[in-house]
Image: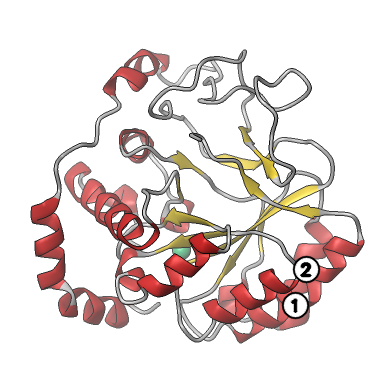
């Protein structure tokens, strides 16, 4: 979305923010789950995931459509599920390999012009996706967030106003992330478990705050560059050329005219399914 659009939304909802802010309890914690990792520094040690590895030796059976993501740097042995994720040093970039699974993600929404059509298409093919919403968009369309959750999609946190987080203070980053989680909780009944930094701009503070707020960082494998409106065929081509087990696809359901993104989904989704891909979302961290 444009900066002007964001500012308009921000000002129109400022009073609501103040009320919501006053309701915050400061419940975010997670220090117990993160302290041990802060000493990892910038060395080469892989960070253990917060979850047991999926596979034949996994602690519990996975739902048929539920898989989990693995960090690019590898992972350690299974461990008990902590109350909060550990602090990452890089985001997840892809799904761990178990068959031909892929994850579709849609950022920057919701937008009532495009998000419902995308939801309709996903429902038509009975698949689930991830929506990384911006709080400034979501606050006016909580019905769309509720629909996402009701239909089995994963609603993630994409900050309030889509800033370059690496240029912000720690307090401002927390403000952007926490308020967005508040709106998601209000609309969906639970706080998000995943977040994605705008522009893929991560730093240590972003990872720390994400963990404190109970969220895992997810990036992507394929960038469709749909926001550049390259043409429906170009978007479809990027998805199909990049399709592979474990791939996470980045698209957008807002931020401009996303007609091409909608049309592209209608084209590549049935083709991926025909090719044997299982379109899924990561499993829930907590039951
Ligand atoms: Zn974005």
The outermost residue toward the right is: 275
How packed mark 2 is, by other alpha carbons closer than 10 Å (few <14, some 14-19, many 20 or more), is many
* Label 1 residue SS: helix
Q: Is residue 145 left or right of residue 170?
A: right
Residue 198, quarter of picture: bottom left
Count of labels in the image = 2
Distance from label 2 to label 1 (Cα)?
A: 6 Å
Residue 135, horizontal then vertical, whole percent: 32, 64
Name the image quarter holding the N terminus.
bottom left
Q: In this view, does 64 lie to the left or right of 215?
A: right
Residue at 10% in and 72% down: 15
Residue at 60% in and 22% down: 52
In this rendering, does residue 109 appear at all?
A: no
| Rendered image: mark on residue 266 | 1
Front in this rendered view, residue 5 or 44: 5
Would you place residue 189 above or below residue 253 in this image? above
| Rendered image: mark on residue 56 | none
In this rendering, does residue 26 appear at all?
A: yes
Residue 170, quarter of picture: top left
Which residue is tagged 2?
A: 269
């Amino acid at each position: 979305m444009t900066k002007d659009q964001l500012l308009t939304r921000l000002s129109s909802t400022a009073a609501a923010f103040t009320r919501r802010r006053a309701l915050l309890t400061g419940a975010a914690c997670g220090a117990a789950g993160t302290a041990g990792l802060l000493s990892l520094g910038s060395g080469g040690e892989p960070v253990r995931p917060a979850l047991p590895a999926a596979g034949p030796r996994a602690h519990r059976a996975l739902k048929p459509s539920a898989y989990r993501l693995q960090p690019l740097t590898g992972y350690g042995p299974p461990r008990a599920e902590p109350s909060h994720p550990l602090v990452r040093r890089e985001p997840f970039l892809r799904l761990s390999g178990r068959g031909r699974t892929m994850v579709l993600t849609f950022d920057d929404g919701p937008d009532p012009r495009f998000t419902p059509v995308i939801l309709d298409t996903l429902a038509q093919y009975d698949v689930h996706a991830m929506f990384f919403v911006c709080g400034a968009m979501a606050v006016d369309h909580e019905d769309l967030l509720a629909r996402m959750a009701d239909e089995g999609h994963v609603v993630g946190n994409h900050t309030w106003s889509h800033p370059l987080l690496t240029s912000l203070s720690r307090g401002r980053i927390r403000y952007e992330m926490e308020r967005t989680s508040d709106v998601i909780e209000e609309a969906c009944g639970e706080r998000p478990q995943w977040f994605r930094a705008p522009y893929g701009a991560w730093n240590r503070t972003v990872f720390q705050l994400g963990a404190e707020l109970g969220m895992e960082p997810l990036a992507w494998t394929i960038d469709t560059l749909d926001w550049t409106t390259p043409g429906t065929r170009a978007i479809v081509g990027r998805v199909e050329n990049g399709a592979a087990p474990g791939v996470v696809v980045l698209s957008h359901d807002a931020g401009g005219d996303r007609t091409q993104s909608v049309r592209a989904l209608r084209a590549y989704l049935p083709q991926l399914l025909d090719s044997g891909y299982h379109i899924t979302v990561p499993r829930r961290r907590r039951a």
